[in-house]
Amino acid sequence: MRKFLTVVAFMVISIGLFAGYSNFGIPQIEPAPPPTEEKIDLGSMTMEQFVALGERLFKGKGTCTLCHNSLGRAPALDVISTNAQARLDDPRYEESGGEATNIEEYLIESLVKPSAYVVAGFGKKGTNDKESPMPDASSGSISFSQTELIAVIAYLQDNGGLEITVEIPSDVQASVEGEDDGDGEDGEPREAFTEVQDIFDNFDCEACHTITEEAGDAGPNLSAIGAKRDRNYLRRALLAPNADIAEGFEEGMMPDDLGQQIYASELEILLDYLSELK
Amino acid sequence: MVKFDKIAGRYFLKSNQKSLVSGLLIILVATVFMVNWAGLDAVRAAQSTVEAVEGATAVDGAYAPAPKLAESDYPAVAGINGRLIVWVVAQLHLWFAAFVLAVPIFVFIIEVIGMRTRDKRYDDMAYEFIKVSITAYSLTAILGGLLLFSLILFYPHLFTYLSTIFSESMLYYALLFFAESAVLYLYYYGWKWLQGGFRKWVHLTLGLMLNAIGTTLMLLANAWLTFMMSPAGVDAAGVFSGDSWAAIHNFLWNPINIHRFVANIAYGGSIVGAYAAFKFLTARNQQEKAHYDWMGYNANFIAICALLPLPFAGYYLAAEIYAYSQQMGITLMGGIFAWLFIIQAVLIGTLFLSANYYLWCGMGRSDGAKRYTKYIKYIAIVLVGSFLVWFTPHTLVLTNSELKALGGPHHSILGPLGIMPAKNTAVNIMIIFTFLSFLFYRRSNKIATVSWEKTGNIVQVALFTAGIVNILFLGTYHGYFTNTVYKVAASIPQVVTTLVVIVGSLVLDSFIYGKSRDVGPLHWGRIPERAQYALFLLAVAFTWLMGLMGYIRSGIRQHWHVVDIMRDASAQAFTPTLGYAANVVSVAALLFLAMVIFVFWIAQVSGSKTLPAGYWKE
């Protein structure tokens, strides 16, 4: 009996260790809840708000940033001002069955018929760039509504430095699905982040800046910024990014509305962290 | 949903599938009976389920789309968390199913070895295990029934939809279940009757049939669950085309089939090993000790043989998930699930270290093992090193002060070890060195007699060296000197290299030691008791790991019952945290192990006799 109890205790302790490690040895991340439907009053919406809605859909429900990010899994979308027209002009475009005649149509086609034209090197393996790994954004797990598709196009055009050609749908009421990402856009103020990584993630800093390894290079490398710039400079660079442009970078790349989105406590956490990067 | 069910019902009654309806109704009547008997407040839910199943989805020759559900479509039964019940019951059923599928494979192999070597010990061991699996088989069926009832009770519309698409295969499943029972009983009860000459061949054929039916059952059940991940044979709205084979042969069916088949063998070996270990620890004499030591060795050997290709099967499955849906693939390997693979690394490290430790301890059975013991410490260092590489996360979620101290979410030196090529390299190295442990064990009691032994050894060392260098080169080049997109390109050549090393070395070794002589008799039973705990750890780690991977396989569907087709609208549609999942898996694993102990105990009781002196009339 003693041996039996020893074996049972050994097994229980082993399972306890596995469970303990899973609970206390790794971070407990609360997964985002399933998207829920929310009513949007399109009638009172400005284009800026509509673009913000598109951005939320792009990063949330659309899960677009899973692939369209700095890791290069899918074509970069912040350079469509130069790339979109080039792709329309590509002889492969018509050959592969593309039907768009302008950039807006091309963007819509890319969202709902992603295999109509596949950017070279981004096709499914073994299909010779004939088939895109991207799902149809108007069906399946993404299932953007017409309004949502237009909002995403507005965001893509705005983000890519293009003129916004789409119009806000005239329906006064429309519903969109989105995850409650705590950004306050559903009327509730979000909670302030207390961890610097959460702030980076929320404002997508690493999409353009190398703060740590394997991050973006569209903005200045910040991995040792604390050694070069003082706290006041950094504050100005965050709140008024076009006041001083780092050498080799263009004006207007960094969003100038961070000051309207970031909480004071978060700004101080960022400044503390960046100042220490030496 | 009522309208949907009524419309669907008209078609179903027109179709000539009344036999299926009858079968399902019998099951449902049994459900209602059981629910009433149990006093649960679920009659309403069960009745709506009966309607739902009767009205299986078709209108005028065409099937209806997948239902769009609301939270109210999920019956509330006495405040019980339906997902939790289905989760635990499904996991318990799966563990037992894996066990009862694996044991006959294991038994069949041992019976063949016994027939070939004419060593009766193998036949006795095989019989001992099929005896154990009889009780386990009953528990598997009971848990399968419980799972069915749970699904009908808590997810009636999902069950209705799936049973519409898989009506034929569900019927065949039930029939095959009868066939498997019949063959299993014949196989077990006929063991001593069908002995010697032609009769033994008949018995072996029964074993083969048992395995064929068991595997077919697994393939059918796999089709249902993989349909939920990668639906086929339906359109975007979930309308069934009527092509059952297309639904069965969906994109992820074969990758799951291969992965589960190999994993079941490894799992069965580990459970049998734990049984042998316990019997060893409680053995009353040296003869029993020797017998169960020998049994434990054989079980561990089979578990390792299946464990070695398992990471490849897992990698193939993950690659196919990516190929099916990049989104699903990234959900699998990124976000919260990324941390799950760190837990998985701990578990797999435990498996490899336990299996190797048992082999090293087992070398004590031979007086010739001393020639190889000096190398064990180096193997241990490599295994631990590889485990630590696999264990290294890529991006760390840290507090602000930790981030400051580290200089970012990646450690400057260790961070690069977090990427997939480094982990692939580590696992291939672990497999090669585990094989090396086995090779040393195999050689420990042998003395080669061929004249070219030294040359053979040099070739073998060269093969290992070239293989390891190639694996390191491929991992380093593709991991750090190519674009992100090509980072995993090294995986297939690395796997091929590992296989070449293993197969090439085995072939060479069989020539070198083909006509070898033994150092002396093997001393079965001469193994420390602590080695038996390695076998227990192997079984526990396997059980727990299977539960954890079940969570991720199901979790990557996120808020979908059937991906992109039928949404989960229940209150439990969210993905639970890893800690919560680990707790559920732990409780389920404890329940499972308690049941396994019961199964083993019953098998032991069946062989015990009490002579009640004076009780019966003379």
Image (tube, coloured by chain):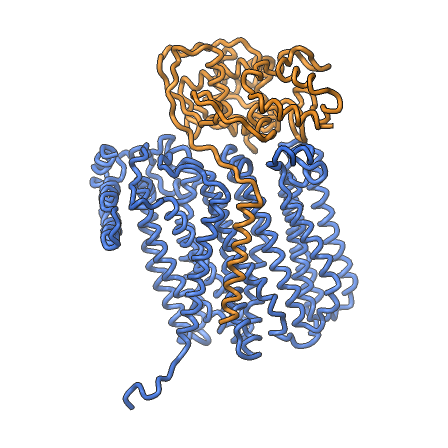
Chain colours: A orange, B blue
Residue A57 is at least partly visible in this image: no
As drawn, B368 above or below B155? below
B146 lies left or right of A199: left
Q: Position of residue B461 (x, y in %)?
A: 75, 56
Of residues B429 and B334, which is closer to you in this image? Answer: B334
Of residues A226 and B596, which is closer to you in this image? Answer: A226
Query: Who's the residue at 69% across and 36% down the image?
Result: B406
B73 lies left or right of A147: left
Occupied quadrant, residue B560: top left
As drawn, B247 above or below A251? below
B104 lies left or right of B443: left
Q: Position of residue B436 (x, y in %)?
A: 68, 58
Of residues B71 and A163, which is closer to you in this image? Answer: B71
Query: Who's the residue at 57% across and 16% down the image?
Result: A259
Please identify the residue farthest to the bottom as the structure is shown: B618
Q: Position of residue A63 (x, y in %)?
A: 50, 28
Q: In the rendered image, which quarter contains the C terminus of chain A?
A: top right
Residue A42 is at least partly visible in this image: yes
Query: Who's the residue at 37% across and 47% down the image?
Result: B86
